[in-house]
Image: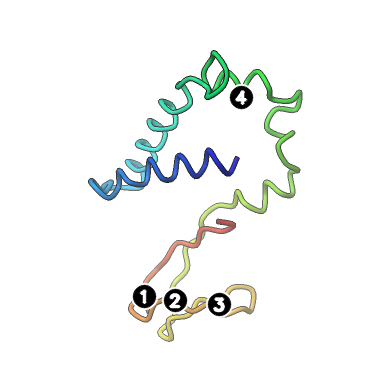
């Protein structure tokens, strides 16, 4: 998983340096389009696409074979909005996290598990 993720990140992320998406929805559409084209490309060592290879080799339980439900829940959480305090800190479960001073008073989105 790590290698394809790095490949996609490096190739797709550079597009944002040339043209920044206007909305989160647009960014997600661009990523979906990129992933669809990427996965339709030929597998590096097989005579079919990356997607066809993945589907042919997935276990009986599908994506559930990839990791336990508990592991999935650790990295697949919904983003959460929080307001940064005047001291440029966000407190989560009793732990204070410092952010950039100019973010004081701003509302931020926390992306858990990344």
Q: In this view, does 103 lie above or below 109?
A: below
Query: Can you name the residue that lies furthest to the bottom here?
Result: 87
Q: Which x, y percent locates residue 11?
A: 38, 41
Label 4 crowding class (10 Å Cα cut-off): few <14, some 14-19, many 20+? few
Q: Nearer the viewer's eye, disc 4 or disc 1?
A: 4
Q: Name the residue under label 4.
A: 54
Q: Residue at x 46, y 21 (%)?
A: 40
Query: Can you name the residue that lies furthest to the top here?
Result: 47
Q: In this view, does 67 lie above or below 114?
A: above
Query: Can you name the residue that lies furthest to the left here?
Result: 18
Label 2 crowding class (10 Å Cα cut-off): few <14, some 14-19, many 20+? some
Q: Look at the numbered disc 1 and give the secondary structure of its residue.
A: helix
| CA distance separating discs 1 and 2 | 7 Å
Q: Earlier along the polypeptide chain: callout 3 or callout 1?
A: 3
Q: Earlier along the polypeptide chain: callout 3 or callout 4?
A: 4
Q: Residue at x 35, y 43 (%)?
A: 27
Q: Which x, y percent locates residue 48?
A: 54, 14
Q: Name the residue under label 3.
A: 91
Q: Nearer the viewer's eye, disc 2 or disc 4?
A: 4
- Nearer-the-camera pick, 65 or 80: 65
Q: Which x, y percent locates residue 8?
A: 45, 39
> Would residue 58 be found to the left or right of residue 111 on screen?
right
| CA distance separating discs 3 and 4 | 41 Å
Q: Which residue is drawn at 32% across and 41% down?
A: 26
Do the residues under discs 3 and 2 have CB atoms within 8 angstroms? no
Q: Name the residue under label 2.
A: 99
Q: Earlier along the polypeptide chain: callout 4 or callout 1?
A: 4
Q: Earlier along the polypeptide chain: callout 2 or callout 4?
A: 4
Residue 105 location, quadrant: bottom left
Quarter holding the N terminus? top right
């Amino acid at each position: 998983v790590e290698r394809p993720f790095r490949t996609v990140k490096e190739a797709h992320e550079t597009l944002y340096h040339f043209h920044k998406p206007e909305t989160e929805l647009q960014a997600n559409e661009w990523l979906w389009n990129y992933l669809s084209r990427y996965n339709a490309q030929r597998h590096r060592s097989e005579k079919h696409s990356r997607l066809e290879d993945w589907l042919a080799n997935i276990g009986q339980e599908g994506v559930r074979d990839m990791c336990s439900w508990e592991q999935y829940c650790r990295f697949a959480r919904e983003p959460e909005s929080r307001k940064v305090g005047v001291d440029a800190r966000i407190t989560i479960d009793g732990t204070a996290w410092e952010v950039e001073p100019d973010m004081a008073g701003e509302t931020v989105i926390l992306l858990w598990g990344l």
